Image: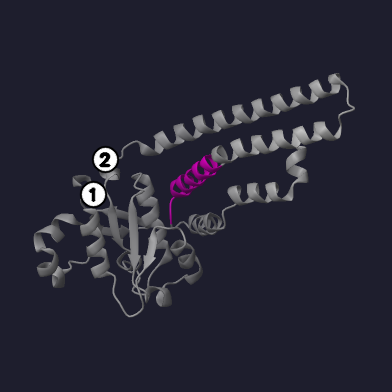
Amino acid sequence: MDVIKKDDKLYSLLEKIIFNENEFKLLKTTINEVSKGKIQPKSLRNLIIQDRIRILEDLVEFFPFYIQYSVQQFNKSIERNSYQTDEILNQKIEEREKLLQIIAERINLLVKTSSQEVNHVKKGVPQKVNSYYYVIDGSNVARDTDSNGSILNLILLLEKLESYRISNYKVICDRNLYYTIDNQKNYTSLLENGHFVETPGGTEADPFILQLAKEKNGYIISNDLYREFYDQFNKDWILSKRVTFKIIENKIYFDNLDRC
C-alpha cells in the first residue's frame, strides 16, 4: 500500500476510476428524486449496481498494470538497498505476495457479488428484448409529461432500459430541447454518456431517428406516428418498428416491447 500513498499519479488514476463525475451527477439527481418520492428506491439500487459493475470492470483491467508497477518499484527498492539481508528481503517478498493474494480474493468476491445482483435484476426480462438495437426519440420522452421537457422522464427511460438489460441504443434529441428542459446541467451530463445525441441546430430528430433505425434494423421508441415519412421509409416498416410508451406515476411503460 505504500506504493499507492507515495505515488500521486497512481492515486489520481484510482480516484478517477472510482469517482466518475458524470455517474456521480446522475446519482445525485436520482437520490434527490427518490427523496421526493418521484421514483422508486429500486431504481436507485439498479443505478448503483450499474455503477459498481463499471467500477469493477475498470479495476479488473487496472490491477494487472498496478501489479506490474508494484513489482517494478519493489525491484528498484532492492537495487537501492542491496546491503539488506536475505531474511529482510524474503520478508518483503512474503508481504507482497500476501497483498496480491488479498487483492485477488477481493476481486473474486466483487465479481461473485455483482454477478448475483445482475442475475437478480435480469429476472423477468423478456427473451430477445435486449438483443436488438433501439433508437429513442429523446425529445418525445422528455416532453411526455411536460411540454418543456423533464429530466426525470429521461432518467426513468434509462432505468427502464437498464431493467431490461438493454445496452444497444441511441437517444436522439432535438437541439431545442436544451433550451426548454427543466434541468440543463443534468441534461448536459446525459449528453456526455455516449448514448445521447443532439441534432444540429435548426433541425428535427425525426429523419435522423428513422435513418439510424433503418441502418441498424432497430426498433424506434416514440409516440410519434412519423406520417410525413411513410413514403420515404415505408408505412408498414415504420409501424412494425415503432414501440410506444407512456409515463404514469413516475414510471415508464412500453406498450409492445415484448413482441420485439
Q: Compare residues 205 and 252 and report the one nearer the observer.
A: 205
The residue pinned by badge 2 equals: 126
Color theme of the render: one colour
Extreme residue toward the bottom, this view:
202
Judged left or right of residue 215, residue 33 is right
Residue 244 visible in the displayed image: no
Q: Residue at x 55, y 57 (%)?
A: 28
Q: Which residue is denoted by mark 1 in the rendering?
A: 257
Based on the picture, tell me whether residue 175 belongs to the magenta stretch. no
Q: Quadrant of residue 209?
A: bottom left
Tell me if label 1 and label 2 are in contact, CB under 8 Å: yes
Quadrant placement of the N terminus: top right
* Residue 125: image location, x then y, percent: 30, 40
Residue found 90% across the figure and 27% down from its top:
83
- Check if residue 44 falls in the magenta segment: yes
Q: Measure the C-alpha gap from mark 1 to mark 2.
A: 9 Å
